[in-house]
Image: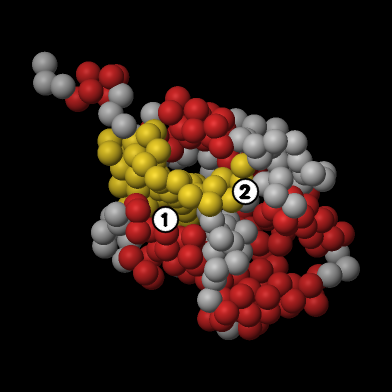
Amino acid sequence: MTELESEAMEAEFDTVAGWTEEAVRALGAQTAIPAGCRGSGSEGALRWLADRLELRPGVRVLDSGAGVGGPAAWLAAERGVHPVCAEPMAAAVRASRRLFGLRAVVAMGQQLPFADASFDAAVCLGVLCTTSDKAGALGELRRVLTDGARLGLLVFVADGPLGSAPPEGNEFPSEAETRELLAAAGFEVLEATEADLADSPEEWTRAADAVDAEVERRHGQDPAFRQAQENSGRVGRLLSDGSLRPWLAVATAVVTVRNARDTSPN
């Protein structure tokens, strides 16, 4: 299954993205980053990743599967980086441009429209479980990163059988499988931990809840809203019963034999 083949995923990540932009505009700019980060990690998780990515002001950071751009906007505000968003859902891309002024392109994670070694760092948050071609997505991330660049990941991993029905279009890897995929793509895991997805500041939670409530007030009777709610609710239930773990990791793009040969003097 590709990133665009699930109707439920399109409702959750495309249709609702447009509604989220609409709600943020109605409620105020202070709700934008909290709403934009929901589903992509807590403020604490983003800070953990940012600290270990060793970001400097002005560096180019790719967010692959960026959604409406909340994490990228947070990184820009907190660390002074220049983020670029790649996201397959057109409504989400429009929202990231309009809400945050981000450079954003409509692109599949397995077909990034960037030259080799274009970025100094990258993040990929809650995305790997939404595609069956995980190797392709990680291979593209390695291609567009410079040697030694760091990749920050949030992956919902399943190390055993799921306790309830999975969300449509999702395939959850185990931690061991994720580590193997990273190694095969040319990454070395430097540090990993389990995220606490409830550690955002209270004002973040209130703002994100207000946006969710506004979206429901405007569109709660729409079948796409109910479909998206069911899909995201399934993830919540699997996290609650321990079937899924929110795995945070930072990996470095290692110099492969091929890369070393390509850059060696004649």
The amino acid type found where label 2 is placed reads Arg
Furthest-left residue in view?
Answer: 266
* Horizontal side of residue 93 vs 264, given as left or right: right
**In the rendered view of the protein, which quadrant contains the N terminus?**
top right
Q: Residue at x 26, y 62 (%)?
A: 57
Q: Is residue 192 above or below residue 215?
A: above
Q: Is residue 122 above or below residue 259?
A: below
Residue bearing the label numbered 2: 245
Q: Quadrant of residue 140?
A: top left
Residue 243's x, y, as percent?
71, 45
Q: Residue at x 76, y 46 (%)?
A: 167
Residue 48's x, y, as percent?
42, 59
Q: Residue at x 35, y 44 (%)?
A: 150
**In the rendered view of the protein, which quadrant contains the C terminus?**
top left
Secondary structure under badge 1?
A: helix
Secondary structure under badge 2?
A: strand
Residue 96's x, y, as percent?
53, 63
Q: Quadrant of residue 3?
A: top right
